[in-house]
Image: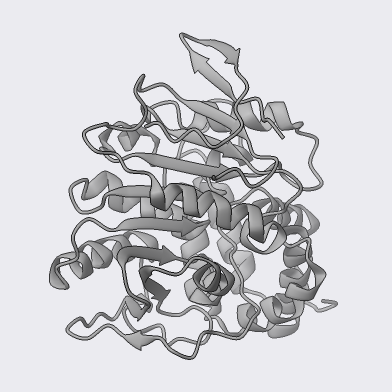
Amino acid sequence: MSSKPETLSGGKMTTESKTKTDFRAPTTSKRLPRAVSDILHRVGALSCLFTLVGIAFLPTVAVADGFSSDRITVNVEGEGDDVLLISGLGSSPRVWRELIRAVPGHRYHLVQISGFAGQPKRGNTEGLVAAPAAEELARYIATMRISKPAVIGHSLGGLIGLMLAERHPQAIAKLMVIDVRPFMGAAFGPPGTTAESIKSVADAILAQMEGLDPAGRQQQAQVTIDGMINTVGKRKSALEDWMKSDPDVVARALHEGFVTDLSPDLSKIAVPTVVLYTTMKNNQLTDLQTDSVYQAAYKPLNGVVLKHIPDTAHFIMWDQPELFQTEVVAFLRWNFGLERKNESNEQITENSQEPNVQ
């Protein structure tokens, strides 16, 4: 089945047919107020920062020798070209289990954020969470002498990947960002919203999250998960793992995501970049409107390839596993040579409708 990618060119949209991927280039006394609850649900469905897990992990991983950090833990699985996998808020690397099994032949570096999914919070006891993780990943790459790995990040992990690519452009070879925009705060304010102007909203959400008791957390998490995962069988385990995450670390990381605008430095990213995204569940935006939102959000990043994945909620890897794996295979096979992104350095927007790698 052919898809019809829409390409931005000089402010106009052009459409062309392609048959394969173009990789050129609770009831409780402390329940959240309804308004805040709705916002958090939108955060999950809009591909903000919630990434939860719910399947048994691979038994054959090994902790990376020669590297120690109080911000992240890295386990290594497989042999081959190096790929860093960064999961999201309240998550462990188990979210990547099906991908690793389906796409062998790579050395996967599975990144776990301290304080998430039962891990001790250690260096994440206070302050920022995502930005220090990006710096630690740069140090990990250098310490372990990894030559320009590919990086794949989901949700909060996608923001960390963007930070890594912006601030250490020579450290990686290519980047895939899954269902997150470079400034999520813009989705919760009027046109012209800035990181500073959205801070009061973020502060209010932080205060409300920190005030929840365990029953309140579980109720809110269930509502959010139901909006992020269409595959019902994944939701129970996802909820369990979320509840194991340190609530303070989760709240601060979410706050950080709201008030961090990576847009001004997108032009510093010197590696080919692919963004997979979805249309927000239970939202009034159409697919075309969602395309426009992502095109505008990533406009400063020359040559970015935007891929709209259909019939999925936030967890593309669980709701559309085969299509997701196909897109990752194409991304990992992408041989750049001397090319920087696609030949024209213009955005490419595509609608994925079926596996499309030969």
- Residue 70 visible at all: yes
Q: Where 16 sits versus 311, above or below?
A: above
Q: Residue furthest right?
A: 27
Percent position (x, y) of residue 329?
48, 54
Q: Where 356 sits versus 252, above or below?
A: above
Percent position (x, y) of residue 13?
58, 13
Q: Where 98 sits versus 196, above or below?
A: below
51 on left or right of 273: right
In percent of the image, x 43 and y 89: which residue is there?
60
In percent of the image, x 33 and y 74: which residue is there?
79
Percent position (x, y) of residue 20?
57, 36
169 on left or right of 306: left
In percent of the image, x 61 and y 36: which residue is there?
189
**Between 25 and 67, which is closer to the camera in this rendering?**
25
**Between 82 and 303, which is closer to the camera in this rendering?**
82
The way the protein has been coloured in the rendering is one colour
Q: Quadrant of residue 32?
A: bottom right
- Residue 181 visible at all: no
Rendered-image quadrant of the C terminus:
top right
Q: Quadrant of residue 225?
A: bottom right
Percent position (x, y) of residue 91?
54, 73
Q: How many numbered circles does the render carry? A: 0
In percent of the image, x 44 and y 26: which residue is there?
299
Q: Residue furthest bottom?
A: 59
Rendered-image quadrant of the N terminus:
top right
319 on left or right of 329: right
